[in-house]
Image: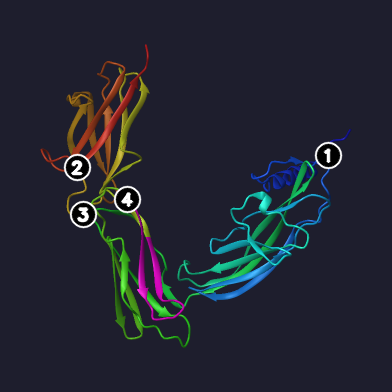
Amino acid sequence: MARPPLILLALFVAAAMTASCFLSCDQAAASDPNPAPSSGPVIIYHDYGTLDLGTRESQDLEIPVPKHGKGDVIVEDSFRGNCSCIIGMVMIHRKDGTKTVAYGLPADQRVVGDGDRVVLRLTLDTRNEEATDVSKLESRGFLGFQLNTGEFARYESVIIRFDYGIRTPIKVSPVAHIDFGELPRSRKYHQVLELSNNIEGQKIVWGAVHASPRSISARLEHDGDKTRLHVTITPHSEPMRHVRGLIAIGTGLDHFTDLQIPVSGTFCGDIQYMPAETLAFDLFDFTKEKVQFVNVVDHDTTRPPGFVLHGIKNSHGNDMSKHFDVSFKPLSGRQTRVIVKYLGTMGGMRMVGELTLAKVQGGKQIARLSISGHNTPK
């Protein structure tokens, strides 16, 4: 027998995987070996138009219930979309006039009977979006149904397509989200944003500026018809911390009372190591020489960028500097390559210790590198 073409085999596999995506965990059922033919997914469409940032709009969409012979039809309890600003509430409008919200209900309470209707309340919420104009977008989601036929079940979905755009009342330039990247403890980050009216005829009355957490400060500057927002980020004493902050500014607008600008980034230590804070000699013969290096950056501009050796000690605190030769190579910026040459003079099976750096001979420790290695078994 001739083998089927590869493209047909690929289509069969893809169809099987798609069907498995709609399996419901709330009711176990075997796959129907002879499923009824399907005419393909139904597509429901709604166009929200362009919404002003800070508003929300809901639309009730009646979802056609897949038809089949005998057995229950169970609607999923939630809508699944590809956009974080859309919320879907699944409701069953019973023929007796009552309404049931499907979310969180067990399967037997989500059965769609004869004469019942399924309505999806689709809400587009722009209140948490950034202050940026969004051109018309096409988004999609789906609502699934489980169709039981005796001991077997099959699954169908209705695809919902919705288009929308967003118009921000206030334009923020150059960006509406401040990302300060990695900020060393000894430095501050400054950025100035320009705020302008984006809708002709609306009147903005600038109010108080609130910023959180306390590492973020912000103030407005008014210069004729221009308004500037000055933002300063000052790291705390923690060596590493991820920051998620927010600046909120009163606008005096009814539907957009606060302009919100997210702030994100990471506070890091003044000393950074590349690729890592470790001189890893790994597995090798301790009677042979071996070289490793680490690039060290000092971001604190109040002190010189270079380093000197402070000491080398093993895990017991004993000096082992006689087994190593350390040299320094200045690189671009405030980066220094620390080159460590093992001299092949140690015994034992493990090498565990630390190498410390200072700025001047006899000065205090500024940086630390761990040392590790394993001797080749004899």
Pointer 4: what residue?
A: 241
Pointer 2: what residue?
A: 366
Q: Nearer the viewer, mark 4 or mark 2?
A: 4
Pointer 3: what residue?
A: 301
Q: Looking at the picture, how far across and down is residue 144, in whole percent? A: 69, 54
Q: Give the range drawn in magenta.
A: 242-263
- The crowding category of the residue bearing disc 4, from other C-alpha atoms within 10 Å (few below 14, some 14 to 19, many at least 20), is some
Amino acid type at circle 1 is Pro
Amino acid type at circle 2 is Ile
SS at badge 2: loop
- The crowding category of the residue bearing disc 3, from other C-alpha atoms within 10 Å (few below 14, some 14 to 19, many at least 20), is few
Amino acid type at circle 4 is Arg
The scheme the figure's colours follow is rainbow
Q: In this view, does 339 lie above or below 359?
A: above
Q: How far apart are marks 2 and 1 (CA)?
A: 69 Å
In primary-sequence order, the first of circles 2 and 1 is 1
Q: Distance between the residues labelled 4 and 3?
A: 21 Å
